[in-house]
Amino acid sequence: MKKLIIVGAALAAFAAPATAQETVRIATEGAYAPWNFLNDAGEPAGFEIDLANAICEEAGITCEIVINDWDSIIPNLLAGNYDVIMAGMSITEERLETIDFSDNYFPPDPSRFVAAPGSNLDFANLTGARVGVQGATIQAGWAEENLGANNTIVAFSTADQAMADLAAGNLDTILADGAYLQPVVDASNGAIEFVGEEVLIGDGVGAGIRKGDAELIETWNTALDALKADGTVDGLIAQWFDGMGPFFSE
Amino acid sequence: MDVILNEIVLFAPAALFNIYFAAASIPLGFGLAILFAFGKASRNPLISALSRGYIYAFRGSPLFIQLFMFYSLALSMNVTHWKPMGIDWLVLHPLFLGPLVLVLNTTAYTAEIFYGALRAVPHGELEAARAYGMSPWQQFRSVTWPHMIRLAWPAYTNEVVFLFHATAIVYLALPVIGEQKDLMIRAKELFERDFNAYLHFPVAALYFLAVSLVVFFVFGRIYERLVRHLQRAPKMRYAPKWIR
Amino acid sequence: MLDLLPEWMRDGIGDDAAFWIGYLTNGKHLAWYASFQFTIFAALLGGTLALVFGLVGAGLKSSRFLPLRAIGDFYSAIVRGVPDVLFFLFFPLAFEQTVEWFVATQVCTPETIAASTSPWPPCREANWFLGTTEYLILASVSLGLVYGAFATNVIHGAMRAVPHGQLEAARAYGFSDAQVFWRFQIRQMWVYALPGLSNVWLLLVKATSLLSLLQIADIVLWADRLGAPNFLPAVGLVHGDWRWRYYLVLLIFYILVTWLSERGFEALMRRAGRGMLNEARG
């Protein structure tokens, strides 16, 4: 339930309070393309990896990307296995009770349903459908609350596994982040399409940081402000999300 | 104390899932294992080789990977096979697929136990039965079967307990539907909330221990019945000869 | 990888084959192949520790001193009564917490405890950071503890199976108790223990498939990531769900390891059985 390191070596050390010289460990999931994934070279890559590197360079700190399963990514942040989460994590009231977030680096993004063509799902009053979600996400909570009574909610440990089940016809629909689904729908040549209405959950995507780590949040926000102002964030969004934006620079 | 009691109550519904997985797979595995044990002992080279191969493959690989593989294999056949048959809702459900893989798994282990026992059936008695002119079916019913089951019972008891333990892996490999969570998932989930490793895992372990003891008790009573006519029956112990 | 080949060879294998060789040797696949080292390391270290714990446990179980005997019995009974996967997860997490708790009693002050917002560790300074190496070692110890309990039973039984006459004869020759134990009982015990230990080893090997549960990037995690469907050309080859093929490779790997282990143990048993009565051979 803990963490692994794909790049860089780990040293067992009792963590001293964060200082400028210390390595900041950034956890990501590595299975949520194009946000974060493992590329053909077997290394973490994607929008958030590029952004993390830009932030670390801007702030002049050494960073290390680690991969951690999504369902234990917050517990392991609290347990001190890393210092920052950058894993396409939406800022929500519920999460703010346990961790803090930096300013968002991706604007509020509606969640959307996808299905195979001709699914004819009646979203106004959905019953008896098999709805796939990734476990421990805002969509999982929303689906359980709003659709759970009349439908089957199936929780997968990665979003890719849910997509595999949808493609194989084991799910009627998937509820996930629009920005995750958009490239998939675009690349699917009509095999997967958006259905139903957009659902607004969450306040955009930010970096998760332990409560009380004020210094680190400050570092992140300062760097993000600079990168937003000079267009780096928008550039990366446009690069990884097929020309979306700009959102942050005037 | 209250905390522990609360925890025990909280885990009770989760334990039902583990018990269900074991109960759903043991009877079927028992029956299939007899077939495969005889298959492995068969003089027909093809049947023998197939049974051997099956038993070897399932005993030689981890259940964890078997579960992953069968889920994605079943998934890849969904559109082509299960959908046209209208059974897709069933095949991919963890409450069906879990026991299915457990059956395949326990069949191999149990067949190996039965095969070992089969080879230990005294030859003289079989010859005597044949001399009496018994049909193969009669030989099986009155000589082979009683010997085999008696010889295999202690090891089979261990296998049943191991299978129950193996149910802890099922939901670590298959998707979780709604609130259908077994002891492992429940313990993991609670641990990730408050990091109290010394509470959640031992309580889950307690359930596994308790059910194991019940299995030993029940199977021990059955064993006593099986050997009641023997004057010096070997005692049954929790000391497996063929462990998984 | 492919560009290492001489050109005539590259032409010879054709575009299709060349494509697949290239795909199967890309960095992601190489990382998968490299991750087999974790599995092998955990099996070897876990196996060695299981043998050590088994010998210690068997020693405790045959002790004449009741409390020691009780500890041995308790260890082998409780650990075997619990699923391996449960103990496998519990031990590293509990061990980490225990260490952190000890550290916390030394370094935490009421202020730092008050400043900590997470339920664990008590204060930030007491946090013990564990990486892949540490988890791999803890996982191996955990495997060693679980299967050491099985080995305890096997070795305990084997020690009692050594013919009494042998030990009495040794005593009659004037060997001390310690000499009888080490030179005769332990030496001869192997013949009886090897078949059981072979079973324990095979169980342990199969349990190494659980490493990914401790967030180690092992063969199972990579198989999942490699086989998961990919829709985006920017990420790599676009393909459907290939997971079962990757799992099949792992399945075959484990069957192969089982086969090799069986051959190895057969050779060991032949060696250990030299000069012994035939019936003693497993």
Image (cartoon, rainbow, N blue to C red):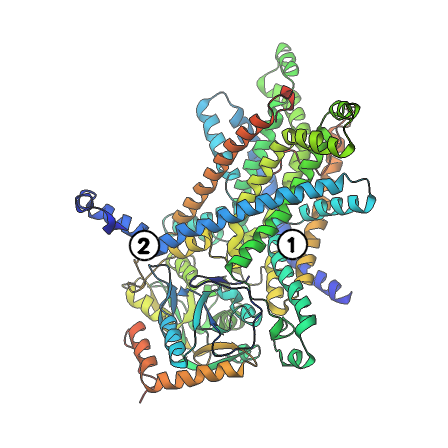
The secondary element bearing badge 1 is classed as helix
Q: Is residue C118 left or right of residue A83?
A: right
Q: Residue at x 71, y 31 (%)?
A: C185
Q: Is residue A203 left or right of residue C24?
A: right
Q: Amino acid at mark 2?
A: Asn
How many other residues sit within 10 Å of disc 1, few (<14), some (14-19) or many (≥20)? some
Q: Quadrant of residue C281?
A: top right
Residue C146 versus residue B208: which sits nearer the camera? Answer: C146
Quadrant into which the N terminus of chain B falls: bottom right
* x then y, percent, for residue B215: 70, 43
Quadrant into which the C terminus of chain B falls: top right
Which label sits on residue B16? 1
How many other residues sit within 10 Å of disc 2, few (<14), some (14-19) or many (≥20)? some
Residue B97 shows in the view: no
Residue B241 shows in the view: yes
Mark in front: 2 vs 1? 2
Report the number of numbered marks.
2
- Which residue is most to the bottom? A250
Q: Amino acid at mark 1?
A: Leu
* Labels 2 and 1 within one chain: no
Q: Quadrant of residue C265?
A: top right
* x then y, percent, for residue B242: 62, 34
The vertical placement of C87 against C158, above or below, is: below
The residue to which callout 2 is attached is: C26
Residue A26 versus residue C85: which sits nearer the camera? Answer: A26
The vertical placement of C281 against C228, above or below, is: above
- Which residue is most to the top? B131
